[in-house]
Amino acid sequence: MTDSDAADAGDIEKFDPGLTQRMVAVLRPFVKTYFRAEVHGLESFPPAGGALVVGNHSGGMFPMDVPIFTVHFYERFGYDRPVYTLSHDILMAGPTGSFFRRTGYIRASRENAAGALRSGGVVIVFPGGDYDAYRPTLWENVIDFNGRKGYVRTAVESGVPIVPAVSIGGQETQLYLSRGTWLAERLGLKRLLRSEILPLSIGFPFGLSAVIPPNLPLPTKIVTQVLDPIDVEAEFGADPDFDEVDEHVRSVMQAALTELAGKRRFPILG
């Protein structure tokens, strides 16, 4: 383990249940009123021990997947079981880094995920990352991890179940037009910011935006469906094919997201 890995592992121990509870108390009326958030299926969530929650990522610069899930999760399970979110390095930098660490955000690395899972924590991962969060609104009901499958290895090596979770509504917080991969490549953003996208969207109050100026999220109704846990070893054997597991996870998520989409009557209103 490198010095960086050791420092990151220490971040897991910085979780502060008291601060997290106060943060959730602030978030709860916002997500339940502004976004009219609903989370279904938590009754089937593993009652104890580590679990890897694998979700589709939505909402661009202001994704609400984690706040909505954690508000409902902590209401049901309490604060003795931490929820950790694998996060980009940018979130952990600067004066706000300490706050995020204390409320369950940790650097996105396999070592961090394994440490959190083995400690009995719940870890949220969005394999599609920004590529998923900025998908065009016309493709909002498509599961696309951009070929990333590392989450399967993390679950297998940590000996924990995968819990798929899908959300709908986040890509309606504004009208996402394009990921802007062509523009990011031309500007060299991968080298400068480790980003392969420069998304274009239309929203309120600035209209057309390429991340800057940042439009505010519209009050769209967001619904999350937590699916049944997947015991990888029980379903795929002691030496599973990671590609096969990934394909299965994405297929059950796609089926659930398609079902949610079929129940949604209107954009934004839900």
Image (cartoon, helix red, strand yellow):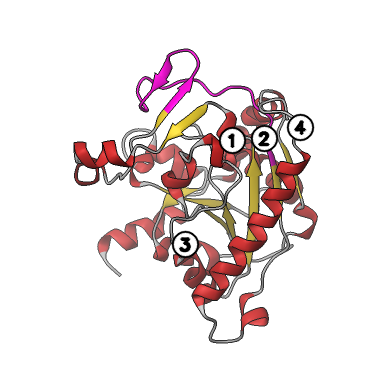
**Is residue 119 covered in magenta?**
no
Residue 213 shown in magenta: yes
Residue at horizontal 50 percent and vertical 16 percent from the top: 204
* Disc sitting over residue 265 in the figure: 4
Of label 2 and label 1, which has the lower sequence position? 1
Q: Is residue 71 above or below residue 218?
A: below
Q: Which residue is mark 2?
A: 222
Dominant SS type (magenta):
loop
* Numbered disc 1: secondary structure: helix
| Residues in magenta, as a range | 201-223
Camera-near label (2 vs 4) is 4
Whether the residues at callouts 2 and 1 have beta carbons within 8 Å, the answer is yes
**Label annotation for residue 113:** 3
| Residue occupied by mark 1 | 170
Disc with the residue nearer the chain's start (2 vs 3)? 3
Category of crowding for the residue at label 1, using alpha-carbon neighbours closer than 10 angstroms: few (below 14), some (14–19), many (at least 20):
many
- Placement of 232 over or under 7, stated as above or below: below
Residue 237 in which image quadrant = bottom right
- Which of marks 4 and 2 precedes in the sequence? 2
What whole-number distance in Å separates the C-alpha atoms at marks 2 and 4? 13 Å
Distance from the alpha carbon under mark 3 to that under mark 1: 25 Å
> Residue 261 or 73: which is nearer the viewer?
261
